[in-house]
Image (spheres, coloured by chain):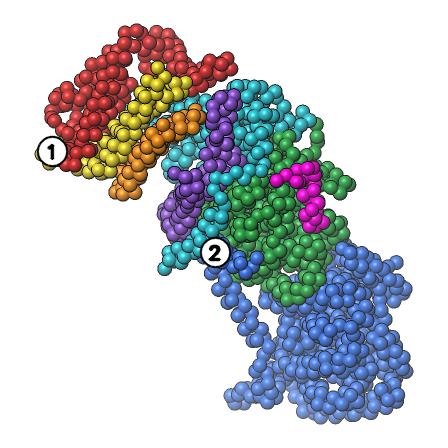
């Protein structure tokens, strides 16, 4: 179990790194590909344990689908957030009502927490100031509520739903 | 915008910027009391000189002296319109930067030791050796 | 008062330097030797990046010096900061800094291999792109810096750094001497130059730049680790 | 065999001696003895030959002129006697190897100076002589810091003045050959003439302790072991005289710059007077002799400065004699020191009983020094007076006369304070006569003094030969007379006998009269009358004997050259103390200097470039 | 076409200048870091824009490296603000 | 086809530039560091993404690299803002909060808590 | 395969420096042995190359990376540069022997020490040999960066303070030099020194002079010219003993070399010589005067060293062949004698906390050999015959006389008196003051004694027979002063005409 997990992690890392290498070089010339295989192999050896938690499982079609879903959810939130910011910034009155709120997440995976934090940061009027264990501290440009659960619903739930599925 | 005007503006801004960096840096070295600030001022002077060197090697509308495939084949008009800037300053500035980095790093190490020894980073208070 | 004097002095220097600088026409082609480089780099050495061929070949001797400067800086910092390295090696530095944010720590884990990959890409393609051994090495060292600042207990094995440093340095200088042994000049290319814009082109230039990349990376990492691990040492007795 | 080899042999022997002393003291002493015997034996038998060495494109020439031979004779005689004398004298001291090595180095240096026919090699040997004597001055290590430094500084000033002269001469004459320098000197511009000769004179003047360059001498003479001081004051200082004679005679006499000769002569005269005064007030025998030496060298300078045939002759004659009698006197002091461990008049008295031989040689030397007939000193003084009078230096005669008269005071002090007077039994208890090996050199030199007094011709011959090198050809002399400037012979013998008669007469009178008055009292008895002792009561010849005289001349003595030098050096030190502040210790300030320097260069760029 | 790019260039430059104003104004070190962060992101875009203007992919590489270095730089200053590195 | 892609590219570039400007305008206008971060991060991320994406349209062969940069920016920008915010919080910079929402306590608590956690 | 090659002066030390940590992992002792072998090889290299230069009468031009100058960087091993390189490598060996037992127990320290010593040697030689001005800058930085840690090598002292001052001023130096190089490059488009020298006339007057001033300033700092030498006394006095010798015999040599090349070869500004002469005089007088006022031995030696640098500047500033020959002689002497003084002086104050001159009183008996050798060094440096210092001083004075600089002669001699005062104060103290017993002297190890004896032997031998090496000085002077020949040797072909 342990060994297979490691192998899976390693191959995942290798593949991802190699993919990025290909993106860097943007070519399939033999020399480049061979070098890329070797380089990403070496880097993967030293990093696979930290680079991923679930290894090759990430490539399971279900998860990929959820990822795609997440991307769209996120992009929509991003655009919304930016328009939101634009409105605030461009408004001469600067209508803000800032505050700091907190909520608890159900996510266990470190990576999931990271993605959630980043997502929150990039979406409307909120960003993550700190994460301690399961507690997220959020700076909110326009505070709508302060209760933990309400905050959770308002800010985190849409992302967390999908993340829970991806990272289990 | 006419070519000459552009050249004037660029010249003033690049030469001016490097001169300003040099002078500001030297001013910092001479007036700041904090050892780290003095070191940082030195790096500012370095940057000024490096900027000057690179801007001296610039050629109007020039491009980086790297022959990419497209340029080699001559398919894109860039080759005809854009000459390559002088590569030597870039190579030398690379060296100068690395050297400056080495000096700054050693300087910082010295600052750390001085701080441990004298418990201050004020250059006026570190004067055991004089006369 | 002193400041006024300094400003006056700087004003004089500034006046004279400005006088000189603006005498030099901006953006005009005044290349002499560079013309040769721009001609010979693609045609003789088959190296796309002229800066690289200057750095590694035409003026490779400078670069050897430059690598030495880094090596020296690392040696110097070690010598300045540590009395007994034994205390330090293989010992977690346990810096006094507070924990970094968990988020940052996780992201560092993910980003580190990517940064190293980028660094490797940069120094492997030094002769094709605006990269090179120094740039790539710096990027990799930055990756280590990321880990060093986010994980308080993270420490680099100086023993392996020593090996990398040494091997990379010896590769550079050794290739130079090899040229000498093969009856050519020091640092002269003795390998086929290949086709321009291919990865395997430019003869020894690529190899040297890879060595430089390793050297710079290990050197800078060592420096950063040394600088960041100083707090252990401060408890050591200052007496000689 | 070339001349150079002798010198190298001496140097080599010096090192061997050092090593020999490392092995065994007796072996070392044997080495010293061998050199002491071999040196005169070799010197008086070999035939000189010239030798040239090329160094850095310069040709350095070696060989004796007859003038140099004269001095070489003195050096050889005095050195070998002093070396012999040293063997017992230095017996109890440590680091003998070091002492003898430097002793021999300085002997070699002196011989080298005399052999050099060019200025560069002269300078080299001059410096060897200087530093080896310096090393001996500080060899005993007691309170020598200031003395050694003073000696070194003055030597350096002198040597560097000489060096400057040498490089200028090299430029103006085209080479450093001494004869060619003299030959081309008339073609020099007057400034060049003045500069080159003055610089050389400064160089030589320091070694011959001419005022105001004498400051180093009392300390240096005093601090070195007496066996070396005999050479130091007797021979080494004559190197200055040697050079001065060359310069004064060759340059001033033959190139018509008499005014410069006057300067030397006057410097000598003043030195003679003041040094004699100083000598009078010394309570330490060594100091007394040191100042006396300075004074005597003053006479010699007078003779050289006046620059007539007779005066130069007198100067050289006095120079040789001074070497001899001062040699004896220093050996006497050494003998006393050796036996009693003391050199202060206040501690010593009545030695005549225990050290009669020493008293005898001291007496002979003192008479020679004082210039009384029948001994040789008188002849020299006589010639000097005559030469001054014939060249119309009447005022100078007064100076010299004053000095000579005053010299009697310290001569008396010397003899009486040490050997005669109250005898303290406790003090004399362990004192005995010096060993034979110390007696021999003293005795032989004293004998020669008597011989030269009676038959000055013995020494006239080499002096006359030496004079020919200086351009005074055909100086006529006989065994007891010298032909003076008017072509008349000076008859010395009658005068000699006359003075001898007067001297013996007075000696008898004084002895008889005093003998009657003499009464033996215990030294603890001096205030037995209950009468309090006042300051001005001199109970002993040794202490403050000439206090009334001092009151008379004290206005002159107030002005010491030393204070002047001290002020100069203080000023220099303070000047540089100010400069030292530049190095403030603040790195930023150093950076500021860089910026200031840059600014200055930029501002001045249109002027400089 | 050129005009368009020049306008874009102007806009980006203006963005840079505005951030720089914040950088100069401060008032705290953190504010300056925020400005710096924004500026570095802007510069990344600017470099990409140059790449397009000069039709040289090499500037994209520069932009990538700049992104990495800028990020880590900001991170370190942030760590410093936290009270130690 | 080519022109459509080009116009799309220009559109994205324009949007990107606009947001970049907006972001810097935001950090200039906002009252305190935390709200400046809000504006700065979001808008500049959006701006650079837009611009890079637009360039990707115009130079399709560069797309792989551009995507790498975009991913990197997506990953790094929020993190750096977060780090700055946390750092300012720990270095004691108080946010300017609306008094009606008395949640300043929470950030203070949050900081303290996280500091406690360290020790 | 070439046995001896100028490039090996630089390449081998670097190679060995990189490898040394690995050698240390194989066997601890190799850390100390290998550098010695390297230095021995460098001396062998010197001998072979020098005999070639002497026999052919032409400098050896080595091109690097297969490109003829001015495209590639080249090294010029001439009778001038080769001689200085030879001095430096020989001093390297002596420093190695002297420090062979240095901190034997502490592996890491000795590793770093030897690496730094090797690199400071390689850097100094690189400065001297290179024919490319930017390359010269790089080597100067190598020298500087290996000097900083050497100054701060000991922890118990104020080395870090000294080193930091050195670093600030040194950074100014490198900035000025770089700026000067930038200006030259912007006008001539080349970095090859021969080509710069050939085409310097093409530079507009104003830019040329500014570039000259900047380079003069930068090199002046390295050459320890007053008032740019504030760092020097601190650095000399805080560094370990052998490092003081390294500064005197290597880095200062490299510094003075640069300024000589600047004035003699690179530029055609006649006032440069006068400027050098003037600055030399000021440096000489001020430094020797301040040395007079020092209480600490090494600081005194440091100021004395600065004075000697002033003397060197004077010699080269006079700019006649005789003066340049004298300058070469002084340069040689300074390396040998100052090293002896630093070597022996550091043993004299070895256990003293404050390194005061009065701490070593009475050591003539405690450390007879060391004290004697220090004394010999003092005698030699003030120019007492028959030691080597005398001939150098004499030739300088004669050269000044030839150039009608009579006041200068007087000045140098007056300063020499000052020199005598402070050196003999120490010598007197050594032998004739009472040992205060505040600390026990540290007996020199056999290897240190050996080095000091070798240096002493050189001083005496050259003093007795200066012609032994005099011809090398003459050849070096010829090589330095024949600018056209230098250019022709480096750029023999049609490249001369390239524009
Ligand atoms: Na240009
Ligand atoms: Na620098």
The residue closer to the viewer here, G178 or D551, is G178
The chain displayed purple equals B
Residue D599, numbered label? 2
Task: Specify the colour of chain G.
Answer: green
- Across and down, in percent, residue D577 comes to 50, 64
Q: Which residue is mark 1?
A: F102
Asked which secondary structure carries label 2, the reply is helix
Q: Is the residue G298 above or below the residue B65 in the image?
A: below
Stretch in magenta = G477-499
Task: Specify the colour of chain E.
Answer: orange
Write the residue at 41% across / 57% down: C8
Task: Specify the colour of chain A.
Answer: red
Give the spatial CA distance, label 2 vs label 1. Answer: 61 Å
Residue C53, numbered label? none
The overriding secondary structure of the stretch rendered in magenta is: helix
Write the residue at 55% across / 54% down: G225
Count of all numbered marks drawn on residues in the image: 2
> Chain for mark 2?
D
Write the residue at 59% across / 67% down: D146
The chain displayed cyan equals C
- Across and down, in percent, residue D172 comes to 75, 67
Write the residue at 82% across / 73% down: D444
Please say whether residue G488 is one of the residues in the magenta stretch: yes
Image quadrant holding the C terminus of chain G, namely top right
Task: Specify the colour of chain F.
Answer: yellow
**Callouts 2 and 1 in the same chain:** no
Task: Specify the colour of chain D.
Answer: blue
- Across and down, in percent, residue C38 comes to 56, 30
């Amino acid at each position: 179990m342990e060994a297979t997990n490691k192998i899976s992690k390693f191959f995942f890392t290798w593949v991802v790194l190699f993919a990025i290498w290909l993106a860097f070089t943007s070519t399939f010339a033999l020399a480049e590909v061979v070098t890329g295989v070797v380089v990403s192999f070496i880097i993967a050896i030293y990093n696979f344990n930290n680079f991923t938690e679930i290894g090759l499982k990430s490539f399971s079609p279900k998860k990929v689908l959820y990822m795609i879903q997440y991307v769209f959810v996120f992009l929509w939130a991003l655009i919304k957030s930016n328009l939101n910011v634009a409105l605030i910034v461009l408004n001469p009155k600067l209508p803000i009502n800032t505050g700091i709120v907190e909520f608890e997440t159900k996510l266990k995976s470190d990576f999931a927490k990271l993605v959630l934090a980043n997502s929150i940061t990039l979406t409307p009027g909120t960003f993550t100031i700190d994460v301690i264990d399961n507690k997220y501290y959020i700076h909110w440009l326009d505070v709508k509520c302060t209760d933990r659960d309400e905050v959770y619903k308002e800010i985190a739930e849409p992302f967390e739903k999908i993340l829970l599925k991806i990272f289990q | 915008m006419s070519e000459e005007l552009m050249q004037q503006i660029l010249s003033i801004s690049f030469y001016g910027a490097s001169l300003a960096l040099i002078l500001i840096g030297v001013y910092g070295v001479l007036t700041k009391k904090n050892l780290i600030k003095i070191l940082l001022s030195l790096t500012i002077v370095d940057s000024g000189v490096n900027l000057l060197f690179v801007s001296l090697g610039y050629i109007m509308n020039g491009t980086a002296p790297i022959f990419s495939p497209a340029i080699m084949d001559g398919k894109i008009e860039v080759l005809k319109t854009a000459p390559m800037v002088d590569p030597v300053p870039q190579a030398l500035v690379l060296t100068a930067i690395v050297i400056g980095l080495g000096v700054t790093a050693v300087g910082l190490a010295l600052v750390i030791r001085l701080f441990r020894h004298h418990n201050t980073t004020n250059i006026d208070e570190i004067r055991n050796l004089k006369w | 008062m002193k400041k006024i004097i300094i400003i006056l002095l700087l004003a004089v220097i500034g006046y004279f330097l400005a006088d000189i600088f603006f005498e030099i026409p901006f953006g005009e082609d005044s290349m002499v030797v560079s013309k040769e480089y721009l001609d010979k780099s693609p045609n003789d050495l088959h190296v796309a990046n002229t800066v690289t061929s200057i750095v590694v070949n035409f003026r490779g001797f400078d670069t050897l010096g430059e690598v030495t400067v880094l090596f020296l800086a690392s040696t110097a910092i070690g010598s300045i900061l540590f009395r007994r390295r034994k205390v330090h090696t293989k010992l977690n530095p346990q810096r006094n800094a507070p924990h970094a944010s968990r988020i940052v720590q996780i992201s560092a884990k993910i980003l580190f291999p990517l940064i190293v990959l980028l660094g490797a890409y940069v120094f492997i393609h030094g002769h094709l792109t605006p990269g090179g051994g120094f740039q790539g090495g710096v990027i990799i060292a930055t990756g280590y810096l990321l880990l060093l600042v986010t994980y308080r207990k993270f420490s680099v094995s100086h023993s392996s750094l020593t090996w990398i440093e040494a091997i990379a340095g010896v590769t550079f200088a050794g290739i130079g001497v090899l040229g000498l042994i093969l009856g050519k000049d020091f640092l002269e290319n003795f390998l086929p130059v290949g086709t321009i814009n291919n990865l395997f082109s430019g003869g020894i230039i690529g190899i040297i730049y890879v060595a430089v990349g390793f050297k710079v990376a290990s050197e800078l990492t060592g420096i950063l680790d040394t600088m960041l691990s100083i707090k252990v040492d401060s408890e050591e007795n200052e007496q000689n | 065999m070339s001349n150079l080899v002798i010198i190298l042999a001496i140097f080599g022997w010096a090192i061997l001696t050092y090593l020999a002393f490392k092995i065994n003291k007796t072996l070392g002493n044997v080495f010293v003895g061998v050199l002491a015997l071999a040196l005169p034996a070799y010197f008086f038998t070999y035939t000189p030959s010239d030798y040239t060495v090329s160094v850095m494109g310069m040709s350095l020439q070696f060989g004796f002129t007859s003038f140099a031979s004269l001095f070489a004779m003195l050096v050889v005689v005095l050195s070998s006697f002093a070396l012999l004398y040293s063997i017992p004298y230095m017996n109890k001291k440590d680091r003998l190897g070091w002492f003898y090595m430097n002793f021999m180095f300085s002997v070699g240096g002196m011989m080298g100076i005399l052999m050099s026919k060019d200025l560069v090699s002269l300078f080299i040997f001059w410096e060897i002589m200087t530093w080896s004597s310096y090393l001996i001055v500080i060899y005993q290590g007691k309170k020598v810091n200031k003395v050694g430094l003073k000696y070194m500084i003055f030597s350096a000033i002198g040597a560097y003045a000489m060096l400057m002269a040498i490089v200028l001469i090299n430029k103006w004459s085209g080479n450093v050959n001494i004869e060619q320098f003299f030959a081309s000197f008339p073609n020099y511009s007057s400034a060049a003439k003045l500069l080159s000769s003055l610089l050389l004179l400064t160089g030589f003047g320091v070694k011959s302790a001419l005022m105001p360059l004498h400051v180093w001498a009392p300390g240096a003479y005093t601090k070195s072991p007496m066996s070396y001081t005999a050479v130091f004051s007797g021979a080494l200082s004559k190197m200055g005289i040697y050079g001065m004679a060359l310069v004064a005679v060759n340059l001033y006499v033959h190139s018509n710059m008499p005014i410069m000769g006057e300067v030397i002569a006057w410097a000598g005269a003043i030195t003679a007077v003041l040094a004699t005064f100083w000598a009078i007030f010394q309570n330490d025998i060594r100091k007394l002799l040191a100042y006396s030496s300075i004074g005597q060298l003053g006479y010699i300078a007078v003779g050289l400065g006046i620059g007539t045939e007779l005066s130069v002759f007198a100067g050289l004659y006095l120079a040789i004699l001074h070497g001899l009698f001062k040699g004896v006197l220093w050996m006497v002091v050494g003998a006393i020191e050796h036996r009693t461990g003391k050199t202060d008049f206040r501690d010593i008295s009545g030695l005549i009983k225990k050290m009669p031989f020493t008293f005898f040689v001291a007496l002979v030397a003192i008479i020679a020094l004082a210039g009384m007939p029948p001994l040789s000193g008188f002849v020299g003084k006589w010639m000097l007076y005559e030469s001054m009078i014939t060249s119309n230096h009447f005022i100078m005669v007064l100076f010299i006369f004053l000095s000579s008269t005053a010299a009697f005071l310290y001569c008396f002090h010397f003899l009486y304070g040490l050997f005669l007077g109250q005898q303290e039994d406790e003090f004399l208890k362990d004192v005995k006569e010096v060993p034979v090996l110390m007696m021999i050199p003293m005795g032989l030199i004293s004998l020669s003094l008597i011989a030269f007094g009676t038959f000055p011709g013995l020494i006239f011959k080499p002096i006359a030969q030496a004079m020919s090198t200086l351009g005074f050809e055909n100086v006529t002399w006989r065994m007891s007379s010298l032909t003076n400037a008017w072509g008349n012979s000076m008859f010395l013998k009658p005068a000699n006998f006359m003075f001898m008669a007067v001297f013996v007469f007075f000696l008898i009178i004084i002895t008889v009269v005093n003998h009657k008055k003499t009464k033996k009292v215990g030294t603890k008895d001096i205030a037995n009358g209950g009468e309090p002792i006042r300051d001005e009561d001199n109970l002993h010849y040794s202490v403050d004997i000439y206090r009334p005289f001092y009151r008379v001349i004290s206005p002159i003595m107030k002005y010491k050259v030393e204070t002047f030098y001290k002020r100069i050096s203080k000023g220099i030190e303070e000047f540089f103390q100010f400069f030292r502040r530049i190095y403030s210790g603040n790195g930023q300030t150093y950076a500021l200097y860089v910026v200031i320097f840059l600014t200055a260069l930029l501002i001045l760029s249109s002027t400089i470039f | 076409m050129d005009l368009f790019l020049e306008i874009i260039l102007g806009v980006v430059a203006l963005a840079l200048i505005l951030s720089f104003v914040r950088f100069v104004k401060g008032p705290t070190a953190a504010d300056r870091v925020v400005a710096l962060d924004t500026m570095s992101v802007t510069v990344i875009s600017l470099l990409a824009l140059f790449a397009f203007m000069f039709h040289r992919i090499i500037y994209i590489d520069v932009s990538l490296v700049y992104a990495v270095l800028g990020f880590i730089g900001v991170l370190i200053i942030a760590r410093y603000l936290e009270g130690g590195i | 086809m080519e022109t459509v892609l080009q116009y799309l590219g220009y559109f994205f570039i324009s949007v990107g530039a606009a947001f970049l400007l907006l972001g810097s305008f935001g950090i200039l206008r906002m009252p305190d560091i935390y709200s400046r971060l809000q504006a700065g991060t979001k808008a500049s991320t959006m701006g650079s993404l837009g611009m890079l994406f637009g360039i990707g349209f115009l130079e399709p062969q560069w797309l792989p690299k551009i995507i790498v940069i975009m991913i990197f920016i997506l990953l790094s920008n929020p993190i750096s803002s977060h780090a700055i915010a946390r750092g300012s919080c720990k270095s004691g910079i108080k946010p300017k909060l609306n008094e009606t929402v008395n949640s300043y306590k929470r950030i203070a608590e949050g900081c303290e808590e996280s500091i406690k956690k360290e020790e | 395969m070439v046995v001896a090659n100028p490039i090996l002066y630089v390449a081998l030390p670097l190679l060995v420096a990189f490898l040394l940590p690995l050698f240390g992992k194989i066997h601890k002792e190799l850390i100390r042995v290998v550098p010695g072998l390297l230095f021995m090889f460098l001396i062998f290299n010197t001998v072979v190359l020098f005999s070639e230069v002497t026999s052919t009468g032409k400098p050896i031009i080595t091109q690097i990376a297969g490109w003829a100058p001015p495209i590639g960087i080249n090294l010029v091993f001439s009778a001038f540069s080769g001689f200085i390189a030879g001095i430096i490598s020989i001093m390297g060996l002596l420093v190695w022997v002297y420090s062979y037992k240095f901190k034997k127990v502490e592996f890491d320290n000795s590793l770093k020490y030897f690496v730094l010593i090797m690199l400071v040697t390689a850097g100094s030689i690189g400065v001297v040999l290179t024919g490319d001005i930017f390359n010269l800058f790089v080597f100067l930085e190598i020298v500087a960066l290996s000097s900083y840690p050497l100054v701060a090598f000991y922890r118990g002292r104020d080395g870090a303070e000294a080193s930091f001052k050195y670093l600030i001023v040194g950074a100014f130096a490198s900035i000025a030099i770089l700026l000067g190089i930038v200006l030259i490059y912007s006008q001539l488009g080349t970095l090859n020194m021969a080509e710069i020298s050939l085409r310097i006339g093409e530079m507009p007057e104003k830019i040329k002079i500014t570039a000259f001033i900047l380079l003069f300033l930068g090199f002046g700092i390295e050459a320890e010219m007053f008032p740019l030498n504030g760092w020097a006394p601190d650095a000399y006095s805080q560094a370990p003993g052998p490092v003081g010798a390294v500064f005197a015999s290597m880095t200062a040599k490299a510094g003075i070399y640069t300024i000589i090349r600047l004035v003699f070869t690179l530029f055609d500004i006649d006032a440069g010589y006068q400027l050098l002469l003037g600055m030399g005089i000021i440096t000489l007088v001020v430094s020797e005067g301040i040395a007079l006022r020092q209480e600490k031995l090494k600081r005194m030696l440091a100021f004395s060293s600065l004075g000697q640098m002033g003397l060197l500047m004077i010699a080269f500033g006079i700019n006649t062949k005789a003066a340049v020959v004298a300058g070469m002689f002084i340069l040689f002497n300074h390396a040998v004698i100052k090293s002896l003084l630093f070597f022996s002086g550091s043993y004299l104050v070895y256990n003293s906390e404050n390194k005061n001159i009065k701490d070593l009183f009475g050591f003539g008996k405690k450390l007879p050999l060391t004290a004697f050798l220090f004394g010999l060094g003092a005698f030699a440096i003030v120019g007492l015959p028959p030691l080597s210092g005398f001939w150098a001083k004499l030739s300088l004075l004669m050269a000044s006389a030839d150039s009608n600089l009579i006041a200068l002669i007087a000045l140098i001699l007056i300063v020499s008196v000052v020199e005598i005062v402070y050196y003999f104060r120490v010598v007197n103290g050594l032998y004739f003051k009472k040992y205060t017993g505040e600390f026990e002297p540290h007996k020199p190890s056999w290897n240190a004694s050996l080095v000091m004896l070798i240096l002493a032997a050189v001083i005496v031998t050259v003093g007795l027979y200066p012609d032994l090496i005099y011809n090398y000085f003459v050849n070096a002077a010829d090589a330095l002063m024949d600018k056209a020949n230098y250019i022709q040797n480096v750029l023999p072909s049609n490249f001369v005409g390239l524009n």
